[in-house]
Image (cartoon, helix red, strand yellow):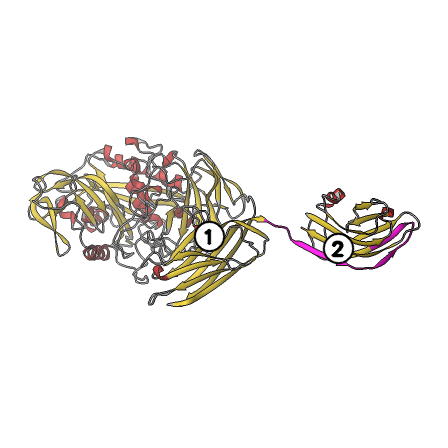
């Protein structure tokens, strides 16, 4: 189908001149307003558009034509009640697109039950020849000829009326040559009734009966798989596109049998009044449903229960609103997500390794994909610079899509259970597409940005739909152009300690003791800054207190019964933005950190899904102290002397050292004292200083014994030795003890 948002269109009236109206909706449900905002309906009795009012939540005609002024007191922008809209939507949908017998009620519309694609017969590769039938009404014809339409559908280097290319060229380009879709154009077929009659009566059977009679039921040219099924039937009717009833452009299924052949999927749209009206956008969009079983990538505003539509992927895909770009003459490409689903991307580039990557514009046979731990959920990166088919986009740069073929673009909420099938991570973080603000704006795409641009703690973020970190980090994105370069993975700077805890911890209702989840930090140092990320499922977050407890026992209150009746607490706190967390800066980080969660009111319950602790810290050295008391006599006047050893089991590089010695001696000027590392490197601590003074009881460090500086960086593990030599006669002594204090 083809949705439109706030478009100004011309409509015919049976008993009055053409009028301009503003339209929002699709063939299932639409709302019409005057250009100054008054809601209107078509009054069948008057044959005119009239101002609408509400009765029991539904639109009814006031009987006042819009050529006159609005009735006194009438309000602008009326909407039917959600229940009425829902009922009309379901009635219309069930009439023209009945559910598949094997499909549950939710497995239709924008949900793709076949790994993201719609149910039904697919002919998305090879040579496919469709049948296109031109249709005229008893009261409305067109000067468009079969040759004009043939050019639009099949022409080589087709650029008439400003079109980027023909429909055939579009699909050959976007499929990487895998789909060659041509059409035989027949007609025009003149219908028996006026155009207004067919707003409420589908003309497909009437037209097909005529064409089948002309062809003697021979449709072999249009059965590429020799299954007795006509691959694709398209109907182009005379006049402007009518965004009402059965004439609203659409793709549906109809089972009509003619000899050995039957119909399956068909599409219907207008051909315009003259050849200058011909544009490829809607035909390409509806053919995406017809041939490839692509789902619509926008929200109908019904199934997710909020009754409000959203733009889905917006202008960034043919199957969103991208078919309307450049007034339908340069439709958006099929996004990388759908091209991948249908098998057009032979070149699969995985982004799960750290490094520099590049995205080439228009390389439609390539998909750049970051995979998560769920096969149905992943991210796709694509160059959408304003070139070629992207020339009409509102933004310019690198697109990042969050994909899940179990999702639906009716689900704009972004929850773990209900979320888009393919959503654009809008670079400005405004969620304008989800909020139905627009179909795209200039700040949606990434480009010309240094540092980390997308990660678990940016806005937008690369978290998975359940709030867990996906691991995708994108940065250093180049400027838009034919080739865009970017980096995957963060360039680590500084020292960051990290602990992620995935749990399924139930939070007891109305119990002050609450629950605790613990994370162990092995690194040693003092905190410089702290980030805490949590994902809590709860039906009333105003009941909750969330607290972080450091290994020392010091506490920081993160969330204190705020948010009222909102569902779920998925939040990031930083010591830069939360004073309570900043109070933990300077704390020793090594040890057990605790996340305490308390539900302090009755009724609502929840659970902790996961939490993540990240600490930027100033490292502090680990210290090992050892000592020995050998009480060894020091031989007099001996160049060999004595040695005492201490065995070091810890491994690491030496960062600081202190050596303590306790020597009893009657003339310390006779002594030379060295410390020897496990590698054999020697540093002299005492070299016959002190003359006739008795005893040597000193602790040496790098300031008192500069030679110790030469040992920094030495491997610590192994036997350390203290060597003592008496190099003169007469006086004697004893090595009573010695000690080492090593930092690493």
Q: Which residue bears the numbered disc 1?
A: 581
Q: Residue at x 19, y 43 (%)?
A: 242
Say above or below: 589 vs 686: below
Query: Which element carries disc 2, helix, strand or loop?
Result: strand
Say above or below: 636 vs 163: below
Say above or below: 398 vs 504: above
Asked if residue 41 shows in the view, the reply is yes
Q: Is residue 625 magenta?
A: yes
Q: Main secondary structure of the magenta part?
A: strand
| Residues at circles 2 and 1 in contact by the CB criterion of under 8 Å | no
Relative placement, left or right, of 168 versus 720 is left
Q: Is residue 164 magenta?
A: no
Q: Position of residue 59 (x, y in %)?
A: 13, 51
For label 1, the crowd category at 10 Å Cα-Cα, with few meaning under 14, some 14 to 19 and many 20 or more, is many
Which residues, given as a range, are shown in magenta?
619-643
Outermost residue on the right side: it is 729
Relative placement, left or right, of 510 versus 63 is right
Total residue callouts: 2
Asked if residue 235 shows in the view, the reply is no
Q: Position of residue 711 (x, y in %)?
A: 74, 45
Query: Which of the 4 image quarters holds residue 14?
Result: top left
For label 2, the crowd category at 10 Å Cα-Cα, with few meaning under 14, some 14 to 19 and many 20 or more, is some
Q: Looking at this view, is 419 or 142 the one in front? A: 419
Q: Nearer the viewer, mark 2 or mark 1?
A: 2
Q: Position of residue 578 (x, y in %)?
A: 43, 50
Q: Looking at this view, is 302 or 624 the one in front? A: 624
Q: Looking at this view, is 52 or 160 the one in front? A: 52
Mark 2 vs mark 1, CA separation in Å: 41 Å
Query: Which element carries disc 1, helix, strand or loop?
Result: helix
Q: Which residue bears the numbered disc 2?
A: 739
């Amino acid at each position: 189908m083809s949705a439109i948002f706030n478009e100004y269109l011309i409509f015919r009236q049976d008993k009055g001149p053409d009028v301009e109206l503003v339209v929002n909706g699709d063939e299932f449900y639409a709302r019409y307003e005057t250009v100054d905002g008054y809601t209107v309906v078509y009054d069948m009795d008057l044959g005119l558009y009239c101002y609408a009012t509400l009765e029991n939540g539904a639109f009814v005609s006031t009987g006042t034509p819009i050529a006159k002024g609005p009735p006194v007191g009438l309000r602008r922008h009326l909407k039917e009640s959600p229940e009425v809209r829902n009922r009309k939507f379901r009635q219309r949908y069930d009439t023209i697109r009945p559910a598949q017998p094997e499909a549950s009620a939710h497995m239709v519309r924008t949900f793709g039950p076949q790994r993201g694609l719609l149910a039904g017969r697919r002919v998305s590769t090879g040579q496919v020849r469709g049948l296109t039938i031109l249709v005229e009404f008893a009261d409305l014809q067109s000067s468009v000829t079969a040759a004009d339409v043939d050019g639009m559908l099949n022409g080589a280097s087709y650029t008439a009326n400003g079109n980027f290319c023909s429909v055939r060229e579009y699909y050959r380009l976007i499929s990487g040559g895998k789909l060659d879709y041509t059409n035989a154009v027949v007609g025009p077929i003149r219908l028996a009734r006026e155009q207004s009659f067919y707003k409420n009566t589908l003309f497909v059977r009437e037209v097909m009966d005529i064409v089948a009679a002309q062809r003697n039921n021979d449709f072999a040219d249009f059965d590429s798989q020799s299954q007795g099924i006509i691959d694709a039937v398209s109907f182009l009717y005379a006049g402007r596109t009518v965004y009402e009833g059965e004439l609203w452009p659409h793709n549906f299924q109809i089972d009509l049998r003619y000899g050995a052949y039957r119909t399956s999927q068909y599409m219907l749209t207008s051909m315009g009044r003259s050849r200058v009206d011909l544009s490829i956008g809607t035909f390409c969009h509806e053919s995406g449903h017809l041939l490839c079983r692509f789902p619509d990538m926008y929200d109908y505003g019904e199934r997710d229960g909020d009754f409000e539509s959203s733009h889905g992927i917006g202008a960034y895909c043919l199957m969103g609103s991208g078919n309307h770009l450049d007034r339908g003459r340069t439709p958006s490409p099929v996004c990388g997500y759908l091209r991948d689903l249908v098998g057009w991307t032979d070149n699969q580039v995985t982004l799960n390794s750290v490094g520099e990557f590049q995205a080439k514009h228009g390389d439609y046979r390539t998909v750049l994909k970051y995979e998560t731990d769920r096969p149905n959920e992943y991210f796709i990166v694509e160059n959408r610079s304003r070139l070629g088919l992207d020339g009409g986009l509102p933004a310019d740069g690198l697109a990042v899509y969050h994909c899940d073929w179990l999702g639906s673009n009716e689900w704009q909420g972004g929850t773990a259970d209900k979320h888009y099938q393919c959503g654009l991570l809008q670079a400005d973080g405004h969620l304008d597409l989800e909020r139905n603000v627009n179909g795209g704006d200039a700040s949606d795409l990434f480009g010309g940005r240094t540092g980390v641009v997308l990660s678990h703690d940016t806005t937008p973020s690369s978290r998975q739909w359940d709030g867990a970190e996906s691991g995708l980090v994108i940065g250093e994105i180049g400027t838009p152009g034919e080739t865009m370069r970017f980096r995957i993975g963060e360039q680590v700077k500084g020292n960051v300690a990290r602990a992620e805890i995935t749990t399924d911890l139930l939070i007891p209702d109305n119990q002050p003791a609450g629950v605790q989840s613990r994370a162990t930090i092995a690194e040693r140092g003092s905190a410089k800054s702290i980030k805490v990320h949590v994902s809590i499922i709860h039906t009333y977050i105003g009941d909750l207190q969330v607290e972080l407890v450091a290994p020392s026992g010091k506490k920081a209150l993160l969330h204190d019964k705020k948010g009222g009746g909102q569902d779920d607490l998925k939040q990031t706190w930083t010591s830069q933005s939360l004073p309570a967390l900043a109070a933990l800066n300077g704390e020793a980080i090594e040890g057990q950190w605790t996340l305490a969660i308390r539900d302090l009111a009755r009724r609502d319950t929840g659970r902790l899904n996961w939490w993540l602790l990240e600490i930027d810290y100033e490292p502090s050295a680990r210290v090992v102290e050892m000592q020995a008391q050998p009480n060894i006599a020091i031989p007099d006047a001996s160049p060999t002397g004595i040695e005492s050893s201490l065995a070091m089991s810890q491994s690491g590089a030496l960062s600081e050292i202190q050596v303590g010695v306790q020597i009893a001696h009657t003339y310390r000027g006779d002594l030379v004292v060295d410390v020897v590392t496990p590698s054999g490197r020697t540093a002299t601590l005492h070299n016959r200083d002190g003359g006739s003074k008795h005893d040597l009881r000193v602790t040496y460090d790098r300031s008192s014994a500069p030679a110790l500086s030469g040992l920094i960086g030495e491997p610590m593990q192994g036997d350390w030795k203290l060597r003592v030599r008496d190099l003169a006669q007469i006086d004697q002594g004893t090595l009573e003890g010695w000690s080492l204090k090593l930092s690493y």
